[in-house]
């Protein structure tokens, strides 16, 4: 089984974390380290369930679900600090990045992430993939994040391609839901990893 571009696709949209770049375990370890200092054990399944949501929006969900009292901004800054400490371990996910290389200059391509733009850009530069993308829609570019379709719809708009002709490569349930809600071709990369 090979990961492919759909024959109806006229544009490609890629999630970053866990799709183009293998960062999910690093993000989880950063959360874990931050929570360990507060005596909280962050369940791995909850981490993956919330994948694609910006950190500052995850904190209120965790506060409610686990009866915590975390400050969203403080928590985000602390978590990102730990992520940066582990950053040198990031690497591309070749089965997906090969598609980006192959279709660069052939089809319009963009990045749709729930992460902060500065960290997403640094991630892409670190693995040498930033040169393939001129368009990135990140957490600060939309109000409604995954599972809302706004991130991917903004990508389509910036590429000038109708949503139904956009193929989204994603590793998270919320991102796949966002792609389907946007009327796009949703492609789950996890079976290929």
Image (spheres, helix red, strand yellow):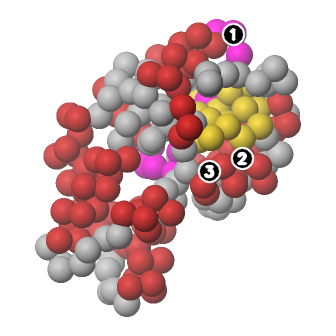
Can you see residue 64? yes
Q: Which residue is mark 1?
A: 106
Q: Which of the two discs, 2 and 1, labels the residue nearer the N terminus?
A: 1
**Could you say whether the residue bearing mark 2 is in a helix, strand or loop?**
helix
Seen in the picture, residue 119 relative to 11 is either above or below; the reply is below
Residue 179, numbered circle: 2
- The CA distance from mark 3 to mark 2 is 6 Å
**Could you say whether the residue bearing mark 1 is in a helix, strand or loop?**
loop
Q: Nearer the viewer, residue 97 or 133?
A: 97
Q: Which residue is mark 3?
A: 175
Range shown magenta: 105-118
Seen in the picture, residue 113 relative to 37 is either above or below; the reply is above
* Residue 151 located within the stretch drawn in magenta: no
Outermost bottom residue: 67
Proximity of marks 3 and 2: CB atoms separated by less than 8 Å: yes
Q: Nearer the viewer, residue 45 or 181?
A: 45
- The CA distance from mark 1 to mark 3 is 24 Å
Q: Nearer the viewer, residue 119 or 185?
A: 185
Seen in the picture, residue 2 relative to 137 is either above or below; the reply is above
Q: Which of the two discs, 1 and 3, labels the residue nearer the N terminus?
A: 1
Residue beneath the point at 85% across and 37% down: 164
User: Which corner quadrant holds the N terminus?
Assistant: top right
Image-based side of 81 in relation to 73, left or right: left
> Quadrant of the rendered structure where residue 152 is?
top right
| Residue 187 x/y as whole percent | 67, 37
| Residue 17 x/y as whole percent | 44, 42
| Residue 114 x/y as whole percent | 52, 51
* Residue 117 located within the stretch drawn in magenta: yes
């Amino acid at each position: 089984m090979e990961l492919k571009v759909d024959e109806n696709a006229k544009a490609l949209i890629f999630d970053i974390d866990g799709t183009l770049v293998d960062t999910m375990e690093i993000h989880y370890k950063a959360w874990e380290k931050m929570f360990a200092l507060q005596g909280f054990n962050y369940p791995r399944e909850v981490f993956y369930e919330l994948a694609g949501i910006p950190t500052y929006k995850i904190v209120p969900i965790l506060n409610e679900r686990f009866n915590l009292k975390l400050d969203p901004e403080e928590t985000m800054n602390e978590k990102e600090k730990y992520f940066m400490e582990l950053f040198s371990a990031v690497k591309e996910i070749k089965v997906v990045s090969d598609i980006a290389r192959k279709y660069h200059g052939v089809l319009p391509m963009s990045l749709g992430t729930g992460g902060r733009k500065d960290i997403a850009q640094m991630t892409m530069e670190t693995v040498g993939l930033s040169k393939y993308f001129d368009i990135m829609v990140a957490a600060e570019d939309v109000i409604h994040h995954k599972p809302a379709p706004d991130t991917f719809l903004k990508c389509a708009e910036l590429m000038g391609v109708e949503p139904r002709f956009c193929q989204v490569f994603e590793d998270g349930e919320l991102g796949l839901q966002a792609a389907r809600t946007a009327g796009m071709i949703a492609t789950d990369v996890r079976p290929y990893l």
